[in-house]
Amino acid sequence: MQTGRSAERNGADAVRSFLKSFHYAIRGIGFNLACERNFRIHCAAALTVVLAAVLFYDFSPAEWGLLILQIAVVMAAESLNTAVEQTDNKITRERSRHIRNAKDSAAAAVLIAAIGAFLVGLILFWDIAVFAAIFTYFSVWYRAAGLVFYAAALLFFIFCKKTYKKEK
């Protein structure tokens, strides 16, 4: 049987371990942002979709839930794809059909998730009247300039130089 101090220490250790798991997950997101161009592409697309939804659409809570779920699924699939690639690269750099198949399957998961997100996006966003309102909104020169600046910032974010040093 545990003494009071021992139980407290085990409880504190459990909390520290739990909090460390968040640290590791956030570090993984940081790695993906720094090193994985496709992850940055998905982040840029997600930000753009959410901004469009906030500015021009009146989604129900269920539609917002579906949109957020699709974004999360694509980002999670991209993270798992990176995990498979990193693990496989650590195992061997030699050509192997098993490694190739693992990497291809992980990439397929991302593609399937992205296609699903695209189709959900079509269903949620396809509204000619809203498209006309968006066109009208950006027909003002300073809004059009802001849109160009936003696009340039996203391109810089996507294609900026890596900040993590990859291990050799």
Image: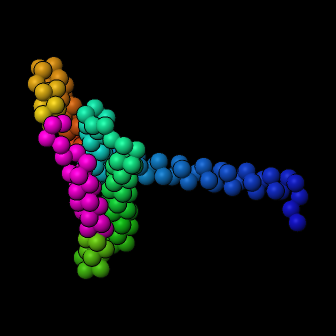
Q: Quadrant of residue 74?
A: bottom left
Residue nearest the observer in this picture, 60 or 82: 60
Q: Is residue 114 magenta?
A: yes
List x then y, in percent, for residue 162: 29, 45
Colour pattern: rainbow
| Quadrant (top left/top right/bottom left/bottom right) for the C terminus | bottom left
Residue 168 visible in the shown view: no
The one nearer the camera, 145 or 88, is 145
Q: Is residue 29 visible?
A: yes
Q: Main secondary structure of the magenta part?
A: helix
Image coordinates of residue 34 in percent, x first then y, are 34, 46
What's the residue at 26%, 48% (across, down)? 124
Which residues are drawn in magenta? 106-130
Is residue 154 shown in magenta? no
**Residue at the spot x=22%, y=56% of the render?**
119
Residue 65 image position (x, y, % from top left): 39, 49
